[in-house]
Amino acid sequence: MLIRKKANIKPSDITPENRYLDRRSFIRSATLAGSSLLFTAGCSGADDDRTPGDSGMQVNSFKDITSYNNFYEFGLDKKDPARLSGKFRPRPWSVTVDGEAENTGVFDFEDIVKPHMIEERIYRFRCVEAWSMVVPWNGIALGNLLKRFKPTSKAKYVAFETVYRPSEMPGQRSHLLDFPYIEGLTIAEAMHPLAMLATGLYGVDLPNQNGAPLRLIVPWKYGFKNIKSIVRISFTEIRPRTTWSETAPSEYGFYANVNPEVDHPRWSQARERRIGSGLFAKKQPTLMFNGYADEVAGLYTGLDLTRNF
Ligand SMILES: Nc1nc2c(c(=O)[nH]1)N[C@H]1C(S)=C(S)[C@@H](COP(=O)(O)O)O[C@H]1N2
Ligand SMILES: [Mo]
């Protein structure tokens, strides 16, 4: 499969992260979680992207990934999700599947995940705010899950919804956004082998601040498409509404593909600040489709990426 073919990232290329490189405890904890493991490196074109001073595909630390977050359900500050998500209970969890599919219903988290191989995929992550990280996710291929629900020929899009639980989510109590947070993909995007649902990172269950217990990862799109703590998946015939494109339509579109040539109205998207690279590190060039153009550009043939931003 595509994801395994271009395995040009070896564990030895990765920042030593003790809890991660202790392979034995990693496998033990994954086995305890009842999941099978597949070591893959889901990145391409990494090495030739490097410019002097570029941190390339060096994986960010567990601390970076879990203490610098956007999750407005818990507050606006990057530190709020880690600080204020302690009350959130991601288990038990169920996901409602509805719309244009044969197998709809309410599914327990375990039933969603269990039939699938838990893969590890190391992906670049690029927020629309022009910062980035590299994250070793664990999870399942989104398309393989969606196929189990047997979408009908009318299913042109897939919509996702985050849990609405103001008692556990202080940002929902202060109405920081029009909650619940919603997102969506075209069915072709959702079926693309790079799209995944993450259940963990660094071999442990997803921390609350990263979207426990289940969040979307579409690595060629800006971070806000990567909706967290998903409770509903809907197959639709018409394009779903999305939180950020409705909050500020001139600034955030439905597609939100990472594109260094299409600036945000208030800032350039040409370069990005790699979290953890140090206060004085140079910004590094942003890559078309976040470096996944070889894999995903074909999804957008004939689409004007400037208008469909
Ligand atoms: N439900 C929900 N999902 C969300 C967000 C949010 O505020 N609420 N923020 C998005 C944005 S803007 C980014 S950059 C990523 C951040 O993911 P991370 O905190 O795991 O790095 O989550 C995305 N998913
Ligand atoms: Mo973001």
Image: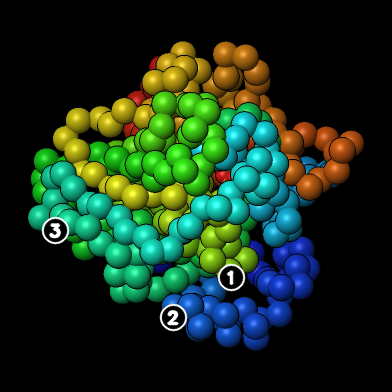
Question: What residue did someone put label 1 on?
Answer: 203
- Kind of residue indicated by mark 2: Gly
Q: CA distance from mark 1 to mark 2?
A: 12 Å
Identify the image quadrant of the C terminus: top left
**As displayed, is residue 58 above or below residue 279?**
below
Mark 1: which secondary structure? Answer: loop
Tell me which label, 1 or 3, sits earlier in the chain: 3
Other-residue count near label 1 (Cα within 10 Å), few / some / many at <14 / 14–19 / ≥20: many
Residue 60 horizontal side relative to residue 297, left or right: right
Camera sees residue 137:
no
Q: Which mark is residue 34?
A: 2
Mark count: 3
Instruction: Compare residues 209 and 196 and report the one nearer the observer.
Output: 209
Which residue is at 42% across, 26% downward? 178
Which residue is at 34% across, 33% downward? 301
Asked if ligand 1 lies within 8 A of label 2, the reply is: no
Tell me which label, 1 or 2, sits earlier in the chain: 2
**Figure quadrant of residue 54:** top right
Residue 244 horizontal side relative to residue 53, left or right: left
x and y percentages locating residue 175 in the rendered image? 48, 26
- Kind of residue indicated by mark 3: Asn
Other-residue count near label 2 (Cα within 10 Å), few / some / many at <14 / 14–19 / ≥20: few
Q: Give the color scheme: rainbow, by chain, secondary structure or one colour.
A: rainbow
Q: CA distance from mark 2 to mark 3?
A: 25 Å
- Kind of residue indicated by mark 1: Gly
Identify the image quadrant of the N terminus: bottom left
Which residue is at 58% across, 70% downward? 203
Question: What residue did someone put label 3 on?
Answer: 103
Instruction: Compare residues 168 and 128 and report the one nearer the observer.
Output: 168
x and y percentages locating residue 205 in the rendered image? 54, 66
